[in-house]
Image (cartoon, rainbow, N blue to C red):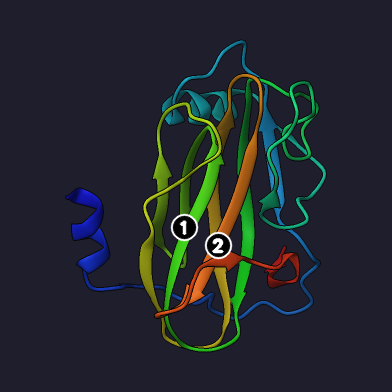
Amino acid sequence: MLAGSMLAAAPLTLTPASPQPSGLQPGLNVRYAYPSDIKSLAQARNALKHRSEAGPPLTGLDYSTTSIGEKALTSKRSETVAADISGYVRFDAPGVYTIDFLTNDGLEAMVGGQLVGKFDGRQTCEETIAVDVEVPRAGWYPVKILYFQRKKTACLHMRRGAAGQRVTWISNAAFGR
């Protein structure tokens, strides 16, 4: 019932970046931490606060499920990785959109100042609860994501769809840093 009630709620209004950035490079910025273990967003946040390092930029948010042993995102490791991801996502038209994420494991995602995705735990590559957002105007919207990967495989995807349409992967070209 919770999921249905969240979908029936009024759309969250996103706040565009102000001023609108210009001259952005493709992708998203990321900082990594590599704790000895990680089971929650609080542990990820704490690890990043105490010791983090810049990683190679993400190309966007379309990282398919890895095989065991493959590195998570652009990190140095395949397991026990915390990531602080930031940048912008572009919406080409105003309107109401549905946003969700696929994540393995934890995720807390903010877009345009609104919490649009959250899972605090461990799972295979599964969807977050879909959230409806209102985009007041075309342009760039800030993205801030806390992510962690604990054991075995990893994935991270962001999807969106205009009101009444199916959600699909967001093209890497829609992200800037």
Q: Position of residue 72 (x, y in %)?
A: 72, 33
Q: Position of residue 10 (x, y in %)?
A: 23, 73
- 10 Å neighbourhood of mark 2: few (<14), some, or many (≥20)? some
- The answer to whether 105 is drawn above or below residue 157 in the figure is above
- The answer to whether 117 is drawn above or below residue 81 in the figure is below
Q: Position of residue 111 (x, y in %)?
A: 48, 63
**Amino acid type at image mark 1:** Asp
Q: At numbered mark 1, what does the secondary structure look like: helix, strand or loop? A: strand
Q: Residue at x 40, y 80 (%)?
A: 164
- The answer to whether 176 is drawn above or below residue 60 in the figure is below
For residue 76, the mark is none
Give the quadrant of the C terminus: bottom right
Q: Residue at x 17, y 50 (%)?
A: 1
Q: Residue at x 65, y 20 (%)?
A: 152
Q: How many marks?
A: 2
Proximity of marks 1 and 2: CB atoms separated by less than 8 Å: yes
- The answer to whether 42 is drawn above or below residue 28 in the figure is above
- 10 Å neighbourhood of mark 1: few (<14), some, or many (≥20)? many
Q: Residue at x 47, y 88 (%)?
A: 94
First reached walking from the N terminus: tag 1 or tag 2: 1
Q: At numbered mark 2, what does the secondary structure look like: helix, strand or loop? A: strand
Q: Residue furthest top?
A: 36
Residue pointed to by mark 2: 159
Q: Position of residue 144 (x, y in %)?
A: 54, 53
**Amino acid type at image mark 2:** Arg
For residue 100, the mark is 1
How far is the residue under mark 1 from the one under mark 2? Answer: 5 Å
Front residue (pair 158, 28): 158
